[in-house]
Structure formats: structure tokens, C-alpha cells
Image (cartoon, rainbow, N blue to C red):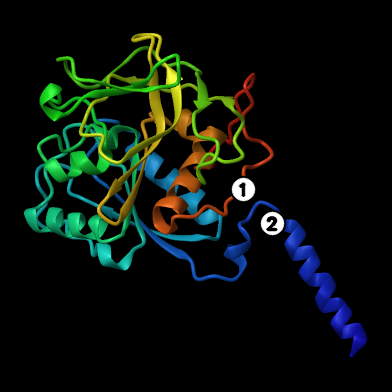
Amino acid sequence: MLRRLARLCLGFLIVSAAVPFLPHQALAAEPIKALIVDGQNNHAVWPTTTKMMKKYLEETKLFTVDVATAAPEGTDPNFKPDFSKYAVVISNFGHGAAAWPEETQQAFEAFVSGGGGFVVVHAADNAFPEWPAYNEMIGLGGWGGRNEKDGPYVYVNDKGEVVRDESPGNGGNHGAQWEFPVIVRDAEHPITKGMPAEWLHAKDELYDKLRGPAKSMQILATAESTVTGRNEPMIFTIGYGKGRVFHTPMGHAEYSVECVGFITTLLRGTEWAATGKVTIPIPADFPTAEKTSSRPFAK
């Protein structure tokens, strides 16, 4: 009996050592149900980035992930996901996406305002400029005719102060892609806690001049745009009713999404949006201030 018990204990220790980066809840708790929505995006890479995000989330053993894909053109009358089945929804829609059916819009507004989590990735903040509730959820957006009517530009000045700039002008812009430093502005928030104060993101578009309602918005990290010279929000959260929204404008291409900084931010941001807490650790291969770090995606 004692030998059998010893073998069981040894087996448990071996399994535990084999998964050092899993959140401890992943071995016991019910998984978090997540839904990725996609189907219309001006970034042709979107089918691949959906697969990448799904894989990264499921690898934690903390999430189960479904995907709901709208028809490729126009408003899809059959696009009616049951949001109530999920704790969090991740959007991989993009610029030029057609409006969702009115029924779906209302269901999504009720889902988030009622306490559901929402994750906004890269071009998802280009989508649906004519949907007021969506603009409130994402906090800041760009393109699609967004301008001063939609809200201020928001950035952080060199004193570390948040600036809400009401000056007229179009929302949304970026320069050439490059590897840029991300500066953590709130080291105590669950999403960014434990991250280096500065880390180098892989090649990506650095969105600047985003603007919007920016209500109940908290900036967690920024990057300095070579176009505007401003510290533009790269990781931020928004409160919408009882719901939590996590927004990152990063993630333009496969090589951007392969960045361990992006992956970690996505995972921790999604867990926070779903639960209000973060248990996923900062991995050992997280980027430093001097060096990027990427995990090639196996297609």
C-alpha cells in the first residue's frame, strides 16, 4: 500500500514539473469558455491569426475556445452567436466589416454590459464606426470616418499624464512596421503585473491617433510613435456596465502575433476580461528591453 502511494505521489510530481507555466487553476477548475468572432477583416491574415489565438488560449488548459465566423461580405442575417454561453468574446473583425444584425448587436451589448468579457485585438478597433455602444466598449478606435465627433485622442505625455486631446482630425494612423519598445505604465494591474518595465515587441504596426469616448478607460502600457512623438496606448482596459474590456492595438501580422509579449498579453488580458483576475504567469522567454522573443507558429 505504501509503495503504491509513493508511486502515485511521484507521478503527480512528474506531471506538475512538466507543466510549470500552467496556471494552477488549470489543473482543477472548470475551463473558461471563450468565443472568437471573425469573418470580415481587411487583414488577409485573419484566418491564421484566429487559429493562432485559439491555439495559444487552449494551450494554457484554462480556456475552451469556439469560433463564430460571419459570411465574407455584407450583413450576415445568420450571424447570431449565443454569447450567453461564454465568459469572454474575442474580436478578430477589422476595417470595413459590415454591421452585425440588429438582434446580434443588442445581444452583444447585453452580454458585455451584464458582466461578460470582451477582448479587442488590432483591427477590431477599426470595425463598426457607426455602432455607438461598440465605440464605448472599445474606448478608442480608428479609420471608418472616425474623427472629433467620436471623442478625443488619448495618449500619455512625457510627465506620465493622460492627455485627452479634443482637437479636430481623423482617427487612426500608423507608420512603417518596426520592433518597438512597450513601456508599462501600471505595474500593479493584474494584466501587466510582473512584466518588465520596458520590453521590445516584435515587428508590428504601431497604431497612433486613435480616438473615441474613452470612458472608464485605464492605460496599462504605451509605445512612442515615430509619427506623432506621443506615447500611444498599447495595452488598456475599459469598463462597460458590469463588463470588462481588454484592448490591444498590437497584432497586425503572423510575426507580430508570434511575439511572446503579445501572446502573454493576450492570454492574461483574456483571463482578466473573463474573471477579473490573472493566474497565467509571465513566461521565462518573455521579451526584454533589449531583445524580442517569438515562438514560431506551427501551421
Mark 1 surroundings within 10 Å by alpha-carbon count, few (fewer than 14), some (14 through 19), many (20 or more): some
Considering the numbered disc 2 on the image, is that residue within a helix, a strand or a loop?
A: loop
Q: Residue at x 26, y 34 (%)?
A: 214
Residue 290 lies, in percent from the top left, at 64, 19
Residue at image location 27% in from the left, 19% down from the top: 209
Mark 1 lies on residue: 281
Q: Nearer the viewer, residue 138 or 60?
A: 138
Counting the numbered discs, the total is 2
Give the Cα separation between the discs numbered 1 and 2. 12 Å
Provide the residue designation for mark 2. Answer: 19
Camera-nearest label, 1 or 2: 1
Instruction: Tell me the element at label 1.
Output: loop
| Foreground residue among 222 and 256 | 222
Q: Is residue 263 visible?
A: yes
- Dividing the picture into quadrants, the one containing residue 8 is bottom right
- Residue shown at the point (21%, 21%) measured from the top left: 171
Q: Is residue 216 above or below residue 208?
A: below
38 sits to left or right of 26: left
Q: Amino acid at mark 1?
A: Pro
Which residue is outermost to the bottom? 1
Q: In the rendered image, is residue 202 in sight? A: no
Q: Residue 249, position in %: x, y?
A: 36, 31
Q: Alpha-carbon neighbours of circle 2 within 10 Å: few (<14), some, or many (≥20)?
A: few
- On the image, the x and y values in percent for residue 148 come to 14, 22
Give residue 32's mark: none
The amino acid beneath tag 2 is Val
On screen, residue 2 above or below 212: below
Residue 197 in the image: state x and y as whole percent.
Answer: 59, 28
When the figure is inspected, residue 202 is found, relative to residue 51, above or below; the finding is: above
Q: Marks 1 and 2: CB-CB under 8 Å?
A: no
State which tag comes first along the sequence, 1 or 2.
2
Where is the N terminus found, in terms of image quarters? bottom right
